[in-house]
Image: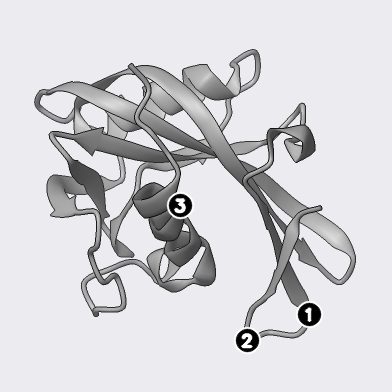
Amino acid sequence: MAEKIVQENPDQHIYLTFSPDLFSERPDHVLVIPIYEGKLLFTCHSERGWELPGGKIEPGETASQATIRETWEETGATILAPKQIGEYRVESNEQVGFIKAIYLAKVVSIGPRPKGFETDDAALFGLDINTNQPQFSPYMKDIVFASIQKKLGTEIQLPT
C-alpha cells in the first residue's frame, strides 16, 4: 500500500510509494535523482531556486525518455539507465492532480546546459543536503524529498 503523507493543507494529499507493484502505468510527470560521482545534480529554476530536474512527459514519450530529456534540458547532463524507484500522486479534494514517477539515474557526463529553458544553473550537492534553506525550491522542502534521501541512504543502489 502507498504511504499517505498529508501536507499542511488538509485539502491536499500526497501518496508516496517505493513499491513497484503500485506504480502507475501512465504517470504524467517525472522527478529525476541524478547521481554524479556520489553527489546529487540539482538544477536552479529561475523562479523557484535549486531543485531536482523533472517535468511533464510529452505526448508519445515514455517516462524513461522524459527522464533523459528533462535531465539534459535542465542540467546539460547525460544519464544512463534511469531506473524507477518510486512514485507519488498528489490529490486535491479527491481528484488526482498529477502522478510523478521518481527515477534514479547515473550521470555519465555534464556538458553545457542548452539555452532557452527555465533553468539558470546546475550544481552538485551531497546526498545529505538540507534543502530547508531559502535558496532551495519549495518543492524540495516536503516530506517526499526527505523520504527519497532516506531510501538513497539505506536501500537504493545506482543503476549500472
- The image quadrant that residue 73 belongs to is top left
Numbered disc total: 3
Q: Residue at x 58, y 24 (%)?
A: 63
Disc 3 marks which amino acid? Answer: Lys
Q: Which residue is mark 2?
A: 8
Disc 2 marks which amino acid? Answer: Glu
- In what element is the residue under mark 2? loop
Q: Which residue is mark 1?
A: 11
- Residue 5 in the image: state x and y as whole percent: 68, 71
The vertical placement of 16 against 65, above or below, is: below
Compare marks 3 and 2 and give the one earlier in the sequence: 2
How packed mark 1 is, by other alpha carbons closer than 10 Å (few <14, some 14-19, many 20 or more), is few
- In what element is the residue under mark 1? loop
Compare marks 1 and 3 and give the one earlier in the sequence: 1
Q: Is residue 11 left or right of residue 87?
A: right
Q: Residue at x 58, y 29 (%)?
A: 57
How packed mark 2 is, by other alpha carbons closer than 10 Å (few <14, some 14-19, many 20 or more), is few
Pointers 3 and 2 in contact (C-beta within 8 Å): no
Disc 1 marks which amino acid? Answer: Asp
Closer to the eye: label 3 or 2: 3
